[in-house]
Image (spheres, helix red, strand yellow):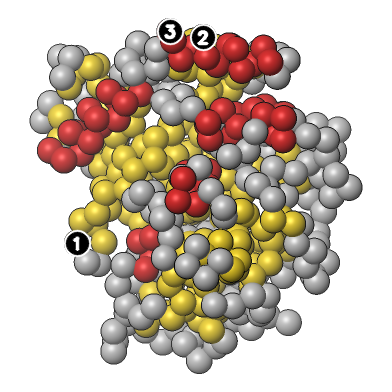
Amino acid sequence: MRITVVAAVAALSVATSLSAAFGAPDDHGPDLSGGASKQPGRSTVAIATGGSNPYGDVPLTTYKLVTALDKDLQGLSFVWDNSTRKVTVWTSSPEQAKAVDGVLAAASAADVIVAVSTYPRSELERAASGILEAGAVGGVDVAWAAPRPDGSGLDVGATSTSGVRSAVPLEYGGIPVEVIAGGEAEAASRDVDYSPFVAGADMVHRIDANYVGFCTSAFAFNHFDLATRTVQERMFTADHCIHTGDSVWHTGRNLANAELGTNALAVSEQNDIAAIGGQDYDPYLYWGPNTSNSVAAIFGYVTPIVGASVCYSGAPSGTVCYNTITHTEVQINYQLADGPHTYYGLTRTVQDTGISAVGNGDSGGPAVVIATGGYPYAIGIISGMQNAGSSCQGDPSSDNRQCSATAFFAPVANYFKLAANELDSIQTY
């Protein structure tokens, strides 16, 4: 039985190869884990998808292909077209397009279009960094910037919800820029979890003598420690969650609850990815409303594709699906408790019907895609939101909780494709 504990103080707003990627499914569903299988002790809920998948139409084979390409090649962008049921791989040069064509031919991959972007991805990312550093473009204050999925220019998110259109087309360094209205970007209960701990649960730590901070746990993974040559269990959360306060986290919303873990070193190149360790963790996530006790197993991880759909499962909000990916490689400025901070490589989504997808306290929680057959695959860690308001799913809004249909997550693929983490692997059922 789970117990709701209300805090008495204010919350802080806070190298898979292609052959392996195309391997046959096992008895528990297709594997794209990078290797760490674990048979946990909890029974799981089945995520019913019927004859078709209501959570998104991207085939798992496409996710596997994209994840393998993303790990082996830099500067690619992936866009799904549901009307043609094809994915376009946008490359940064004709030479890279030829290389991708060769890989696809060797893998006998069909239903894939290879195209060359107008601007190389690296050039667009440098321009996005310049805009964020300046804080504005063409007189418009911006909160985030990202390459357009097809590489034809830049999209930026304005800090204002109005007055962002310019009579003169905007550009930066000769690159066309389009402004999207939004508002300030913010770092965004499965009330008391128990060991072995899983994704989507409340966690709390002390900020100072008067305040505590709330976030949500994400996916379990195995870290290979080079110094001791041992495998250590870890759990993902958001980097901005650990910027201030005590390094020790407790489950739920009360500091008297069991210890969930301690901040651990995680190499992530400023992707808003952090880790905690020191306890036992399992490859599940809480699934359903914020009051639900149901869990679903994790079967691996995938790379984001523009046009695909994801589900969030933050502890205060509960599970919210039908969030369409609009941009990848987003650079964003947050105003954190210890000052302004920029994160890179994030993914932006918008909820299809306009309901809130994430809110304060969901930060650090899991984002997943649901493969045909109801198999959840990790895709990201909840990072933040834009244009937040008082309409929330799950826990209601308050002075310390706002929510939004526009969300940002940090892709877990960004962690696993780094050379420093090549021996790490996500835990799978």
Q: CA distance from mark 1 to mark 3?
A: 42 Å
Q: Vertical placement of 105 versus 216: above or below?
A: above
**Of circles 2 and 1, which is in front?**
2
Residue 310 x %, y %? 59, 41
Above or below: residue 323 compared with residue 415: above
Dots 2, 1 in contact, CB < 8 A? no
Question: How many residues crowd around disc 2 within 10 Å: few (fewer than 14), some, or many (20 or more)?
Answer: some
Local secondary structure at mark 2: helix
Is residue 187 at least partly visible in the picture?
Answer: yes
Q: Tell me the kind of residue under disc 1.
A: Gly
Q: Amino acid at mark 3?
A: Pro
- Give the secondary structure at mark 3: helix
Report whether 194 appears left or right of 329. Answer: right
The N terminus - image quarter: bottom right
Residue at 29% from the left image edge and 89% from the top image edge: 209
Q: Is residue 10 above or below residue 343?
A: below
Disc 1 crowd rating (10 Å Cα; few below 14, some 14-19, many 20+) is: few
Would residue 317 be seen by someone viewing this image from the given angle? no
Question: Pointer 2: what residue?
Answer: 98
Marks 2 and 1, the one that precedes in the sequence: 2
Is the residue marked by circle 3 packed among few (<14), some (14-19), or many (20+) residues within 10 Å?
few
Residue shown at 26%/61% (left/top)? 336
Q: Quadrant of the C terminus?
A: bottom right
Choose between 248 and 54: the one closer to the eye. Answer: 248
Q: Which mark, by number, is residue 62?
A: none
Which numbered disc covers residue 94?
Answer: 3
Dot label at residue 339: 1
